[in-house]
Image: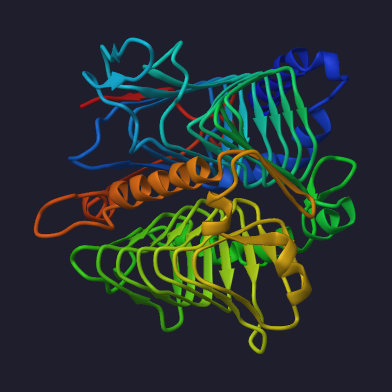
């Protein structure tokens, strides 16, 4: 285990150097999160299809329990039970839009160096114009159930259940359960429970009250997560581990136009519609997946109905809920309905990332509403939602409860709608008569290849250096 310990120590020293101005030490998190014996227990695996460029290069790393798809390089890193999904990386010859279009001279690749990703999701493609062929994560530590979505990172620490989306971060700390989509940030510390979306035309900002956030996602003195959401996930972790114990499983019944990943948990009377994508590490139990809906990585859809064309972004949790057609449920949201207090979300709604709904009374949100923050009762609805038509009328600023919005509401809504449509298109939700193929069609015939670490000797705990090419 000496090599594995040296690897961890090197990662800690590099990240701490980048964050020295904050007097922040990542060592307690790394030491208390990583169980070296467990890092030997789980194999890593990578997927191969005829639709994705193949290139995997793992060197001087531990990648236990992790999944890779698309072109990936991992060097001097520890990646534990994470998903590195490169199926939307840019391809050679594509143009990156800026003042002058930049043609890519080679396929984009996810490059992870000197980093620790712990139960983290990496997906999409980089928005860093300085390195369009590389989606880079360097000298960074990410904690439990972080989403790194199209974001390049250099010298950062991301707290549990944080999401960084479509941006570039340099020497930053992002607090637990924060969602940030704010362009490029240098040497910033984002408070826990911050939801911040910024563009040249608008800005949306909300911050959870500390006493509410601590109840759902808190951390202890070693930066390990605790709280209702963490307990919810932890209770179901063994169901995923069972999937690793069996090499061959009976395929889940689904239409020919839909894809259900072999590493997804499917329980109860779950029904899969047409053009549905169920990603690895999704958890479905008595779920109805209407046509064109999807369940992305680390999503939980339990005793719930998705009407159709519903997007459940990475980490979204939908329990005892009925979700209307063409509704978006954002990253790491927690819609915690009860058997006798279901949640109803109307058609065409946008549930902002990191929204929490947890009430002992039934909750009903009308069609075409924006939803954010914390809803713990029906009284909270008026301060945590707004009709999209009313938001579209905003030209300057709006403040509702703890939410502050500036800019043009119509531009904000249009931007969200475009992104939702892009996700539906990429996921194959709009597939029809051979046109508009997406992940639901292309991911049906993935072959999974496994890799094991050294179990004895000087390199115990590390995986063999390996390069896989077409």
Q: Is residue 193 something one can see in this rendering?
A: yes
Compared across the picture, whether 244 is left or right of 459 comes to left
Residue at 34%, 30% in the rendered image = 89
Residue at 70%, 26% in the rendered image = 5
Count of marks placed on residues: 0
Question: Observer-nearest residue: 174 or 268?
Answer: 174
How was this image coloured? Answer: rainbow
Q: Is residue 179 something one can see in this rendering?
A: no
Residue 228, above or below 447? below
Q: Quadrant of the N terminus?
A: top right
Q: Which quadrant would residue 110 be assigned to in this image?
A: top left
Residue at 50%, 63% in the rendered image = 349
Compared across the picture, whether 341 is left or right of 390 comes to right
Question: Observer-nearest residue: 46 or 295?
Answer: 295
Question: Observer-nearest residue: 321 or 101?
Answer: 101
**x, y percent for residue 4:** 65, 27
**x, y percent for residue 304:** 50, 77
Residue 427, above or below 154? below
Residue 187, above or below 161? above
In this view, the residue farthest toward the left is: 433
Residue 234, above or below 461? below
Q: Which quadrant would residue 237 be assigned to in this image?
A: bottom right
Residue at 26%, 25% in the rendered image = 91
**x, y percent for residue 124:** 42, 36
Q: Quadrant of the C terminus?
A: top left
Compared across the picture, whether 382 is left or right of 136 comes to right
**x, y percent for residue 168:** 57, 22
Question: Observer-nearest residue: 113 or 338?
Answer: 338
């Amino acid at each position: 285990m000496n090599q594995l310990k040296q690897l961890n120590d090197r990662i800690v020293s590099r990240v701490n150097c980048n964050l020295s101005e904050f007097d922040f030490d990542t060592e307690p998190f790394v030491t208390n999160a990583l169980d070296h014996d467990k890092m030997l227990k789980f194999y890593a695996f990578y997927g191969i299809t005829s639709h994705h460029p193949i290139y995997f290069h793992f060197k001087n790393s531990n990648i236990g329990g992790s999944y890779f798809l698309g072109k990936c390089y991992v060097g001097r890193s520890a990646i534990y039970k994470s998903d590195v999904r490169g199926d939307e990386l840019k391809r050679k010859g594509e143009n990156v839009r800026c003042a002058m279009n930049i043609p890519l001279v080679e396929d984009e690749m996810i490059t992870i160096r000197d980093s620790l990703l712990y139960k983290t999701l990496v997906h999409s493609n980089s928005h860093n114009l300085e390195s369009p062929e590389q989606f880079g994560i360097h000298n960074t530590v990410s904690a439990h159930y972080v989403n790194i979505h199209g974001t390049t990172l250099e010298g950062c620490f991301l707290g549990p259940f944080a999401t960084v989306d479509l941006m570039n971060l340099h020497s930053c700390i992002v607090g637990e359960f924060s969602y940030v989509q704010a362009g490029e940030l240098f040497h910033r510390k984002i408070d826990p429970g911050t939801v911040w979306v910024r563009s040249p035309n608008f800005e949306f900002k909300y911050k959870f009250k500390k006493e509410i956030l601590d109840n759902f996602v808190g951390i202890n003195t070693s930066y390990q997560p605790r709280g209702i959401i963490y307990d919810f996930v932890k209770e179901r972790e063994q169901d995923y581990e069972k999937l690793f114990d069996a090499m061959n499983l009976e395929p889940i019944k689904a239409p020919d136009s839909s894809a259900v990943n072999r590493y997804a948990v499917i329980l109860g009377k779950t029904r899969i519609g047409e053009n549905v994508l169920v990603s690895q590490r999704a958890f479905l139990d008595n779920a109805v997946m209407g046509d064109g809906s999807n369940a992305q990585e680390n999503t939980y859809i339990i005793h719930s109905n998705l009407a159709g064309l519903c997007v459940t972004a990475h980490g979204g949790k939908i329990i005892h809920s009925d979700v209307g057609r063409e509704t978006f449920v954002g990253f790491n949201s927690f819609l915690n309905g009860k058997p006798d207090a279901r949640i109803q979300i109307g058609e065409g709604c946008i549930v902002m990332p990191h929204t929490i709904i947890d009430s002992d009374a039934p909750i009903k949100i009308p069609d075409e509403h924006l939803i954010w923050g914390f809803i713990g009762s029906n009284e909270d609805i008026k301060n945590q939602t707004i009709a999209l038509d009313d938001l579209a009328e905003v030209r300057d600023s709006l403040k509702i409860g703890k939410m502050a919005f500036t800019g043009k509401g119509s531009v904000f809504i249009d931007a969200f709608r475009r992104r939702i449509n892009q996700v539906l298109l990429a996921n194959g939700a709009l597939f029809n008569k051979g046109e508009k193929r997406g992940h639901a069609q292309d991911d049906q015939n993935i072959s999974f290849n496994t890799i094991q670490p050294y179990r004895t000797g000087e390199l115990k705990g590390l995986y063999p250096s390996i390069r896989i090419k077409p």
